[in-house]
Image (cartoon, rainbow, N blue to C red):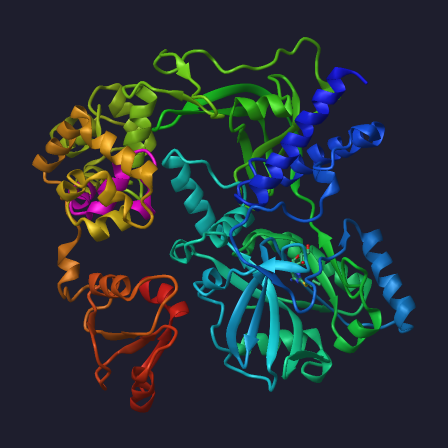
Amino acid sequence: MSKDIVSTYDELVDAVQEARYRYYVLSDPGMSDQDFDALFKKLEQLEKENPSLIRPDSPTQQVGPPPGSAFLPYRHLAPMQSLDNAFNREELDDFFARIIQKIGAQKIAYVCEPKIDGVAINLIYRKSVLEKAITRGNGTVGEDVTLQVRTIVDVPKRLNSARNVDLIEIRGEIYFPLKEFAEMNEARIAEGEAAFMNPRNAASGALRQKDPSITAKRPLRFLAHSLGGAYSLEGESTISLNPESFFPSHSDFLAWADQAGFSVPKPIKKAVSSDETWQAIEYFTAERHNFAYEIDGVVIKVDELSLHQQLGSTARAPRWAIAYKIPALEKETKLISIEVNVGRTGKVTPYAVLEPVTLAGVTISRATLHNEDQIHLKDVREGDTVIVRRAGDVIPEVVKAITERRPENLSIWSMPERCPFCHEPLVKPLGEANHYCENIDCPNRVVESLIHFCSKSAMDIETLGEKTIVVLHDMGILSNVADIFKLHVSVPVLENLEGWGSKKIDNLLNAIENSKQKPLDRLLVALNIRHVGSVATKELTAHFPTLDSIRHAGREQLCMISGVGEKIADSLITWFSNKNNSRLLEELTELGVRTDVDIQLKKGDHTAPLAGKTFVITGTFSGMTRDEIKEKLESMGAKTTGSVSKNTTALLVGSDPGGKLEKAISLGVEIMREGDLEKLFAV
Ligand code: IVH
């Protein structure tokens, strides 16, 4: 066997192992599902052709995720199965034919519901109280993520509508809402961090945080889609009960789950024939972008639970349900050229300039190519015909080149040696996939920093849009962010810009003036300090209320704050020790930009969102300490006291609450649980 084959094989094994590790353990796959499938197939093919090569540690020889996670294993009471897939109408009709043959009846009622592209989870309620939340794992053994799941608002901690049963298992999907996903990715890209590949990976990443307080900060949601099982406990034994004795049909189960406090997939469509099912599929396909979560298919389920028993399941999946996979939105187009952009952190991102194509009503003329390694891995070249894909609301990407249609002599693309904007050499740090322009005066970096400074999540001066920033930068009026606060002297210049009248100029100057009062965490986000994003700045300013106190904090003090690791602490220290940055801060202070937290809100401001409300906190919370909750409530204008009275707005109850809970119940005071906090903090 040639040395080449052996080394290709080793490389493939390594690549698949790395991708699996990144997918399961880091929740950051670094490639799309389709690319992973292609890589895996390549490995399988090579092994088929050369069986003597097969290494025992090859990913083809393993089932389920690799070891390396930090959560406790938990054996499911009943295995968590998967679903069989249908990719076209024929396969769907085969499914119906199998059922009709087995049941012997023609007219069978089905429920069609969206297939949520999330993270499967099993919730166990003991006497109506949430006891455990377990991931699917390999289907038999999952991982205990109870503390993390307890932080999700729409996972009920106690069921509203109990059934007389000792244990009940509710299965569903944890998902990252699309709108928040897009916002988070935008912020990550703006902060120079890698974007999440898709909402499912973002949900999985948030769920797999060892520290549940980090999970609590993510906007995770849950949808219940099936009954796992119902059990009675007798001594040491758990006896599985017949689900039909609780719910005659799956639609009855969903109606109950809705009442019990769960969110359930909506709408569902009932169907009694293949045609009606197909209409439901057409409905979900057309509406897929109007859901708050990513949908990758339609699940068709036999409605009557007694038929589930009759149909049974294979080792992998039940015979009473099937997932129709909605095809990803893909189209062919021509890749005209590969260009690069330099972000405000200096990160260089190559992108494809495409002949425009319309995908689901959106015209796409650019698609990200991530980095040079990705371009080589996909072997994409300028002049190629390529397939572009847009999955859900996610950034369009180039899937692959159609190499059979490649004209001769297309050269392999390589990263330019110098920055196209400032002509300084580009640098690729050892072990990193990205190239950087390290010149902080690079005009593109400066423009990107100015755009970021004005963005909604930073100082919110959106009247100053990208185009105007570029023009004013080119004219030498905006060379750094402090210049924004001197724009009032450039009114005559603004008046001469196309589309700028006195009203628009007034609005701009007002927005700039108002931005000076933004609290410190916004300023810190705006300043573009590497790795310092909105989560870290909130934590920082909760401990250090002024810019000076952060500047003078030592590394150890900074590292002690949850959400601020060594990387962020070092980055802050480096940034503050730079003379240009010190000068910039002095200038901003002189120009009237505030450099402290919003003290007003802390001390009983009547316009604060929780002004006039009084809370009492009792018990232990998994996501935040009592002091943190108190501080947060006070920063929103609320009062907190130590004892419950009829004037108490609500009692916030953690686990092991003690006597305050009884008193609150007897006085009729509202009781709020940990799951309600996110909503309360979002008012
Ligand atoms: S019913 C026996 N309904 O998709 C499993 N599953 O690819 C019964 N999924 O394992 C599951 N949306 O984790 C069901 N509306 C839905 C679903 C759904 C997403 C997940 C589930 C399943 C996987 C199969």
Looking at the picture, tell me which residue is in the foreground, 477 or 605: 605
* Residue 401: quarter of image: top right
Could you tell me residue 673's position as x and y percent?
Answer: 38, 73
In this view, which residue lies farthest toward the left?
590
Left or right: 234 in relation to 318: left
Q: How many marks?
A: 0
Could you tell me residue 253's position as x and y percent?
Answer: 64, 76
Looking at the picture, tell me which residue is in the foreground, 663 or 360: 663
Could you tell me residue 296's position as x and y percent?
Answer: 64, 51
Left or right: 29 in relation to 272: left
Ligand 1 falls in quadrant? bottom right
Left or right: 121 in relation to 551: right
> Looking at the image, can residue 140 be seen?
yes
In this view, which residue lies farthest toward the bottom?
666
Residue 54 within the magenta-colored segment of the rendering: no
Q: Name the residue at 28% across, 50% down.
A: 539
Q: Name the residue at 49% across, 60% down.
A: 221
Quarter in which the C terminus is drawn: bottom left
Q: Name the residue at 13% across, 41% down.
A: 548
In this view, which residue lies farthest toward the front?
236
Above/below status of 74 relative to 586:
below
Quarter in which the N terminus is drawn: top right
Left or right: 11 in relation to 553: right
> Looking at the image, can residue 419 be seen?
no
Looking at the picture, tell me which residue is in the foreground, 213 or 189: 213
* Residue 379: quarter of image: top right
Could you tell me residue 214's position as x and y percent?
Answer: 39, 53
Residue 519 within the magenta-colored segment of the rendering: yes
Above/below status of 647 relative to 87:
below
Extent of the magenta region:
510-536
